[in-house]
Image (cartoon, rainbow, N blue to C red):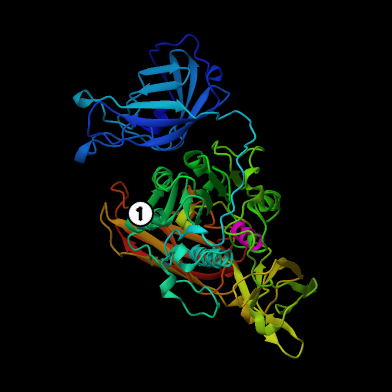
Amino acid sequence: MKLSLLFVFVILSCRNVTALDLNDIMIGHWNIQNSGYLSDIHTEYGVVEIYSDNTFKLVSGTFGAIGMGSNGFCSHIENSAKYRVLTPSLVEFIHINQTVENKVIPDVLEIIPDKIILRNIAGGGCGALGYTPISILTRIENSTTEQTTTNPPISPSPTATGQAIIIAAGGAHPNNTLFRYSNDFTQRMYRLLRMRGYSDEDIIYLNPHAPDIVPVDGYLEADKQDFDLFDPQAEIEQAFAQARLRLQAGQQFVLYVHGHARVGHLDIRPPYELSAQQLRQQLDSLPADVEQIIILDTCFSGSFIAALAAPGRTLLTSTDDASYTWNSEYTSFSDLLIRDLRRGKTLGEIFPLIHQKLSQLSGRHQAQTPWLDDDGDGLFSTQDGTRTANMCLGSCDVHGNQIPEITQIQPSQEISSNIALLWAEINQSHETIRKVRAILRSPTTSGGDYQGQDTAFGRIEVDLPYDATTNRFQASYDRFCTQGLWDLFYQAQSDDGSWSDIKEGQIRQTQNPDTPVCQTNVSIEILLNKFVYQPGDNFSLGMQVDGQQTVTPYIAIILPDGSFVTYSYNLGFSFPNALYPYRETLDLDGLRTYPILNFPMSAGLPSGEYQACGVLLEPQVVDVLNIENWLSIDCVDFGL
């Protein structure tokens, strides 16, 4: 049955029900356990949300069967499956997030005060051999009761801090443009924990690259890299096993993850994902009376809160459970968090400041909503924040060296050429400063929706070396090639790795400079995995771009009959002969490769000669088909 056919009404028999109003039971979160009549059916857990409009939705885990033995006999329904109860015998499918063949629909919905039982919910193929999958929902205690916790905040002793696991998720492959940020923030978290009382033996570091901790001198310290995530599942299990053996009651456990994710799954290293249920099993295996602090800086990180919530476990996520907004290049959750923690602030002091800063972003910044759950109810609400009011990472009494401060920057200026001087003055001796940078955002750059591993993270970053004559850090930048308002973000790093607060400046470019450096500095090359394809062959297309300019890229497939389709990063394939840009803007900062398409070649396509083409234009060009507006073009022939 196709997905479009799932939006139908199905008749269910009902037992032990006098009135099927979910409001009479409990609005909030319920645990779900899936099982069956056959012993070789896998069992998995998850969480269901029940809403006031008589709907219920699977927010983590799965509905129905997971599989049967080695045959994979039954399939299941994953996150976001949503239903609405209409009458005691009528249920409507609201949404199921994948196409399901031969889906088995529920035939019984049984509701009693503390339990909901759903029978025959599965992805398909579960009717043979008398098998009937069962999903049992049990109420999470006090899931909607507003209450103030009386548990005292925990700050572990400096002599017995605890254990920490740090994970750079997503992989270090060239197509993961986020990895440079994940690599940076995981190292910064390592330095923070070291400064707050954790020893190297207390920190378990999982990253394909070894870290550069202290001093930050460019030399990687292989002895501090515990696992390189070559075998991510086994290595994560080993990391938690080590932490489990070392932890003692009264200590603290910290988990920090930065990288890619989807709802309820951390993308550790493709194709391996760590599900919320697997992570919960690891967290639940840690010793009792250990304060757990879980920090997830990924897209959809809020979707983990309901599945991971437990007493004594603080969950801090960089965003909510559903939005595609996630800032990492300019204003970052981890950057704000680590800088304030380094100043000795508690989690309870920091979170409201970060929440306010990110949720009020506007304009070319997209608003982002961090979540906190410190009372174990699986919800982010005004009740959260009491336990973390005095909670520190590590010891509250340990402080680091002075954080550098940028005291003055280049004032805002207008320019008509492509060159401007960028500079910053620091409150410390230049000998204690490792790096000063200016991050540039062009007038045409705007935040885009998160698209997983295909998200193009990138920014223009200019190093400002120390100039003894002026006693400041400065450099001339000659790529202000786009007319409009440029935003500048200045930041300084000390030799112990700590970063200053960001100072923001602006430059207004009043006209498009007609200089060689602004006209001939970009290129595009189309990359294909084959030149001749058969139906079923994997078709892989990418682009390699180079230059120092903001552009609008177009990707097109020209068919044997001469018509074409374009491909959009957000919208997919266009209608025939329609022009969709791959991205509205792309900031080029040197040579970079982007994956674009990867799928099996369909048997229904006409045979013949095709072309895959890429074109770069300046942003906001109206006459896209005018060759004079093309900055660079490349086409590759292939046959089918």
Q: Residue at x 40, y 53 (%)?
A: 244
Residue 334 covered by magenta stretch: yes
Classify residue 76 by image quadrant.
top left
Residue 558 is at least partly visible in this image: no
Residue 100 is at least partly visible in this image: yes
Classify residue 288 by image quadrant.
top left
The spot of residue 570 in percent (x, y) is 52, 50
The spot of residue 75 in percent (x, y) is 30, 35
Q: Residue at x 25, y 56 (%)?
A: 534
Residue located beneath label 1 in the image: 237
What secondary structure is the stretch in magenta mostly built from? helix
Q: Secondary structure at mark 1?
A: helix
428 or 62, nearer to the observer: 428
The spot of residue 501 in percent (x, y) is 70, 66
* Chain part drawn in magenta: 332-340
The spot of residue 377 in percent (x, y) is 55, 36
Q: Residue at x 68, y 56 (%)?
A: 364
156 or 81, nearer to the observer: 156
Furthest residue in direction top, as rendered: 18
